Image (tube, helix red, strand yellow):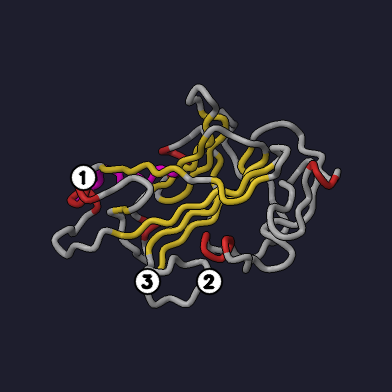
Amino acid sequence: MPEGGPLTPLPAAPAAVSARALLLGLAAGGGLLAGCDTQQACNPAIEVCDGSQGGSIFAGDDAISRVQAGCCAPDDDDPRCPTEGGWWYDLVLEGAVRSAAVTIHQPADFPAVEYEERHTLPVVQADPDGFWENRYRELAVVDDEACRRPGECADRVISGVTTAFPCLDEAEERWQWRMDLFDRDGEVLACATWGLRAVAWAPTCREVSP
């Protein structure tokens, strides 16, 4: 697993686009990441830098290049937001992995009870030669006023579809996240973490700020 510490800084990138925008071909020109060298992933959007163009010099190690995440109300006009509101997770990585998943964890701090969910992120764009992948997941928030805390709604959660974690401005002060890349044997190839005491919770992962 990777050593702890911050990710190598990347050039500024445009905001992530939603899965529906990708499918409609509405991604902004210039792509999700700019440039193509050994320190950053090839651009996975419109102007593709990949093996078929002869422009990639991918170093050969599977690695997380960028993580973005957020939660939106149904009436938010942010183009990254799911149509019905909820959480979204956008991952760009170098290489091609068996699977990727985000784990959301509520620590056992009073008055909360320890609780966590894991959701996989499917591929929405990829280099044909396996130099990079863009994975994305939207999660609808369980709508039940009786659920005051995430753990109280566990039986309503469907992995990859719904989540019991509501949209809160102080979410990163309450919960912890970990994004993992897995090989064919289920071993972790690389990981990133953020949120409440993230490094203490996942000390082998790199800390990021989605």
Q: What type is the residue that disc 1 sits on? A: Val
Sequence-first disc among 1 and 3 = 3
Classify mark 2: helix, strand or loop: loop
- x 41%, y 63%: residue: 71
Circles 1 and 3: CB distance less than 8 Å?
A: no
Q: Is residue 8 magenta?
A: no
Q: Nearer the viewer, residue 27 or 152?
A: 27
Rounded to the nearest whole Å, what is the CA distance between mark 1 and mark 3?
25 Å
> At which x and y percent is residue 2?
59, 31
54 vs 142: above or below: above
Report the residue marked by disc 3: 73
What residue do we see at 53% from left, 36% from top? 181
Residue at the far right: name it. 54
Q: Residue 129 at x, y = what percent? A: 73, 38
Label 1 secondary element: loop
CA distance for labels 3 and 2: 12 Å
Disc number at residue 113?
A: 1
Label 1, residues with CA under 10 Å away: few <14, some 14-19, many ≥20: some
Which amino acid is tagged 2? Pro
Residue 111 part of the magenta segment:
yes
Closer to the chain start, of discs 2 and 1, is: 2
Q: Which residues are magenta?
A: 102-112
Query: Disc number at residue 79?
Result: 2
Residue 156: image location, x then y, percent? 22, 51
Q: Is residue 134 left or right of residue 148?
A: right
**Residue 209 visible in the displayed image:** no
**Residue farthest to the top?**
185
Q: Is residue 133 left or right of residue 173?
A: right
From the image, state whether disc 1 or disc 3 is nearer to you. Answer: 3
Q: Amino acid at mark 3?
A: Ala
Q: Quadrant of residue 133?
A: top right
N-terminal-most mark, 3 or 2:
3
